[in-house]
Image: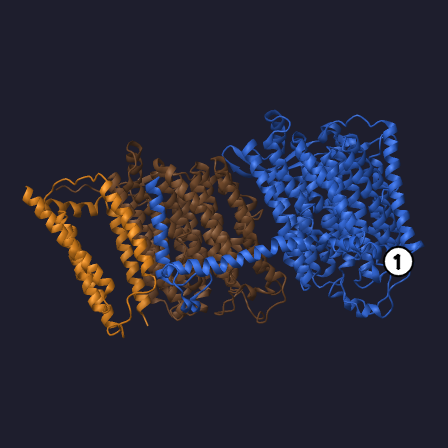
Chain colours: A orange, B blue, C brown
Amino acid sequence: MLTSQFLTYVAFFVLSAIALIGAFLAVTLRNLVRAALGLILSFMGVAGIYFVLEAEFVAIVQVIIYIGAISVLILFAIMLTRGLMTSAASTQNSQWIGAAFVGMLMFAVLFFVAITTNWPLAQPHTISDLIPRLGADLVTTYLLPFEAVSLLLLAALIGAIVIARE
Amino acid sequence: MINYLWLVPALPLAGAAINAIFSRKMPRWLVSVLGVGSVGLSFLVALAEFFTVLGAGAQGVFNVSIYSWIPVGNFKIDVAFLLDPLSALMLLGVTGVGFLIHVYSTGYMAEDESYGRFFTYLNLFVFSMLILVLGSNYLLMYVGWALVGLCSYLLISFWFTRPAAAAAGKKAFITTRIGDFGFGLGVILIFVTFGSLNFADVFARAPQMFQLGAPIITTITLLLFAGAVGKSAQLPLYVWLPDAMEGPTPVSALIHAATMVTAGVYMVARSHVLFSLAPFSSEVVAVIGAVTALFAATIALTQMDLKRVLAYSTISQLGYMFLGVGVAAYGAGIFHLMTHAFFKALLFLAAGSVMHAMNGVIDMRQLGGLRSKMRWTYITFFAAALAISGFPLFSGFFSKDEILAQAFESGHIILWAIGLLTAGLTAFYIFRAFFLTFHTQARWTEDEGRKTESRHSPSSVVGHPSFHPHESPASMTVPLAILAVLAVVAGFVGMPSVMGPNFLEGFFAPVFGEAAAAIPAGTEWMLIGASVAVGLIGIGVAYWFYIASPEIPVNLAAQFKGIYTLLWNKYYVDEFYSAVFVEPGRRLAMFLWQVIDVQVIDGFANGLGRAMASFSGALRGWQTGYARAYALLMLVGTVIVIGWLMLR
Amino acid sequence: MPILVPDINLRIIAPALIVTVTAIVVLLGELVTPAERKRWLGYLSIAGLVVAAFAAFSLWGANASGFSGMVVADNFGLFLTLTIALSAALSILLSIPFIHAHEIDQGEYYVLLLASVAGMIVMATATDLIVIFLGLELLSLPLYILAAFQREDTRSLEAGIKYFLLGAFSSAFFLYGIALVFGATGTTNLAKIAASLAQSAGSPMLSIGVGLLMVGFAFKVALVPFHWWTPDVYDGAPTTVTAFMSVAVKAAAFGAFFRTFQFALPALALDWRAVAAVLAVLTMTLGNVAALLQSNVKRMLAYSSIAHAGYILIALVAMSANGLSSALFYLLAYTVTNLGAFGAVIALSDGARERLEIKDFAGAAREHPLVALALTICLLSLAGFPPFAGFVGKFLIFGAAVETGWAWLAVIGVLNSLVSVYFYLRPVVQMYMSEPAEGWSGIRVAPLVALALLIAVISVIALGVFPAPAIALAAGGLIR
């Protein structure tokens, strides 16, 4: 038991480090393609953390959507936009000190909450149980949000066409 | 008849609405018929209502609810009218004087290209004033209060092509808004305190809930009085009224002499229950009134612009009214309000007639000798001047005397003395204006007029090809004559007890209660004698200075140059306000704009104070225009909000 | 595992459903409508909105909840639904000639607008934080596109992108807030949150969650200091879109704001009321002061809309039945008034050339006396000048604040509305008290714009002079 807990800690810190390094690369690298790859690294770290937290479904969704779809979309967008590939403009502007400062403050507040909160624990479950329940919930309890999301996607689709149309 | 009360305000409103929408497509005579006719009909209805109240005697208080306006929960505000002797008299004044001035305007404004617009505003004003007077709760009164302010603003700036007119409108608006804020706060406080805004509720509850001198009542009344100070042009907010003379003269007569500026007096009289409970506030009202009366009268002594003399005179006379209501002589204050409406409207209209004849010239240094050219104007002005001077048996004599007597009797000897001195000054300055305008040698020639810039109306020059003083048309002289008759005889409704019955006191009994014990006959005669003597001295000195030995005022002005300059410059109050309030306000705004917005906010967004000259191009208003800066500022706001919520 | 039959009650969501169906019909109709007949799509949209309004009206008093407690058809939500439908219909009336003149008359304009309306209705009637969030996104996303609809105009594109970026930013906060509230209470359902909080004490996590929810709402209704996007976006977006955004988004977002805070979080009222009071003061004051400095009408109205959000927030601080109904009335009054003002601005434009600088309005009263009169009435109403709708609205809100012991907030509100008169009167002064600028001749006001203006102005006067029926309706609009 002790070993498993220890291993969990190790996994958590390693994955967190991956997520943080990826995020750091994403905001500091000058080459946009590399920055996007950094972002993918960060997403992967987060997906790993979901796994450690036994939220396997979310982890898989994270991989499929964020890494599989969104990151690829970002890469496509970068490659299709003239001039972005080669540009080496500074990724920093004069605002970064202020942003870092306020970001730290935000972090301090959230960190304080994280350590003072008595976190409720989820019920143990097996993955074979989880996914059918999720599916059932989506067409029963969460039917309306589910439909609203579909409408949202339709609106997004139309919007994309309107913006992209010459 | 009481069921038709709503017609009184509704008719002018209908006139205003029709003229607003259709006047451009209607012939002028139709505009006149609608504009004048609606107010005329309104006057007839008001007259009938007046006699209803008169006939009802002690029961003459009617609450007429038209409909439920703002019902929220158990708190309801109706559009309801309160018809009692006080409002009935005000109705007559507003519609009656209003009607005469409308008739006068058909002649005075005949050649103005914005004829329809003028009558729209004027009708709208009459409607608003009637709402103010008739409203049976403070909210409705506030509605009227705000609307008359708007109309006043529109009408002062009526000839907007003149920069002075536009500036004067702005000044009036800004100054009276300061007072309005006080009035608004007073209304809120009344609501908080009494849970109602209805006059009936508030006045019934106030004596039960509070003792004499309760701080909350004192606060409420002082706030209300702040509104009155702005609207009725008292110290220190009077500065807008002299400038308001840039508006057409009928407007000066109607709004800035006879009706709107008296709204403050009406409001204090209407709230007399509250003021009676607040001796300190009443004292403030009386002192400000008396001091304003004297202060404005001294300025009027040296002014050369005839309309400005009358404007300062109005401020001074309003001071008298506040002195009256401040010493709890509410009936006397309203009495003076009424007689003042007649003689001051008459003075303004006569001045307008002079302007009409002299192609807009109003500077008394360019007038003189008009006596023979304009008989009617001359005679009516003379009657009004006697009335305002308190010449025995003229209307002003009775009303002014009653205020002074009540001030004396209530123990305000100093205020009485100030009032008495002011009466003398009043008689002097009004006869100075009278002599300089109508007597003395003509200080104009046939050629001068053509060079003079027209101040009557920019467009009316066409109608006056030659500078040739003449009597005004009947549409102007007939209202003058009617007002003159009223200015002479109106005082007999409120005679002092030693001379005859005081009808007005009995008439007002349902509102203000039974009259106080009569003043002893000896004292009364003494006070009357003092007033009359002072008035006659004033007239006599004016005659001596301007007719008998015209060199005296010139010598005096040279000898007391300091005082003369001070008065001529109106105590430099405008300059003082400009230096103390306007300029620092402008600088503060510029400072905030440049330092806080441009440097601090942007600077913060760009690295906590880093210089950013490259930004100036992107600077639009307060905003940097950069989404990243906005995002950072939002983040700052978020941290503050959640930090605060967490730390509580 | 067994799947329970969900409780589907389409009647409850009928208004949103009808709007959605209309949007899809218009989308399909776009394919078969020739270019010169595009305005028929606009008429179709208005017809759909009218039907949706009737549906909402027929639900009045139903007080039915459905979809596992996700939405409710209570009078509060229905009142807002009606307000939103009215604002959308008036906006489309203004839009039909406008987008034609600007050569952007594509059917998608109406589709996006209707999708946004559907999102607004969902948001106003939602009783679950998830649904509120989805409504928020559904209303926002089409607006990002609509803001950028004038693609030839870089300022319009800029507005769209800015709105999108910052909107996404604020959505993240809002979503995070939902997550934290869920973490603290174990539910996203408003009623259950209220029940949970009634028993347990608050926690730092809950406080932060509530704060982040507030930030999310504050962004949407443009409260200081989350308002930065407003002037730029309102300025850059097509005028009709600005008109629509400035009123309808406020109605929907404030609806959810009130529902969430007054209904689900009364247990924390001591905390958030103080924050909201400070935000209200900041918002009113900054909005009005900044508006004083503007020379562009759209920017001025943008800052004015910020200030009005501050007034409405006072009603939330009051947290009473009267506060709620006063906010509903205010939103309705603000909707017709602001649309009237924008309508007049559009009416005074010369085809595709708009007059947006205040000095451009010089002498409008001589050329277009009725439009000038309409604009004057609307601006006076915005300033809270009696006897127009805005005055009654302000009176109700300040009255609610005074009743609940927030008189000082009401005093600041009164002071602010007195200040606001100055900038609202500036266009009036230009119209009535300046010599006409050139280029007025030959401008004809489009009949549809005139119609919208007429409806708006009549409503402004009616709501000011005879507000009793609307007040009664709003007072019946209590949250279930």
Q: Can residue C67 be seen here?
A: no
Q: Quadrant of residue B537?
A: top right
Residue furthest to the right? B548
Q: Nearer the viewer, residue B313 or A18?
A: A18
Q: How many marks?
A: 1
Question: In the image, residue C13 lies at what x, y percent?
Answer: 33, 46
Q: Residues within 10 Å of mark 1 (few under 14, many from 20)?
A: some
Query: Looking at the picture, does residue B535 appear above or below residue B212?
Result: below
Q: Residue tagged by mark 1?
A: B374
Nearer to the camera, B428 or B343: B428
Q: Is residue B560 visible?
A: yes
Is B103 situated left or right of C383 in this image? right
Q: Chain of mark 1?
A: B
In the image, B396: left or right of C143? Answer: right
Of B113 and B46, the residue lying toward us:
B113
Is A21 on the left-hand or right-hand side of C475? left
Residue that appears at 27% across and 50% down: A107
Question: B597 or C209, which is in the foreground?
Answer: B597
Q: Amino acid at mark 1?
A: Met
Locate the C terminus of chain B by quadrant: top left
Quarter of the rendering occupied by the N terminus of chain B: top right
Describe the element under mark 1 as helix, strand or loop: loop
Residue at left 78%, top 58%? B108
The picture places residue B26, in percent across and down from the top left corner, at 69, 60
Above or below residue B278? Residue C373 is below
Q: Position of residue B478 (x, y in %)?
A: 84, 52
Residue C35 locus on image (x, y percent): 39, 70
Q: Quadrant of residue C182?
A: top left
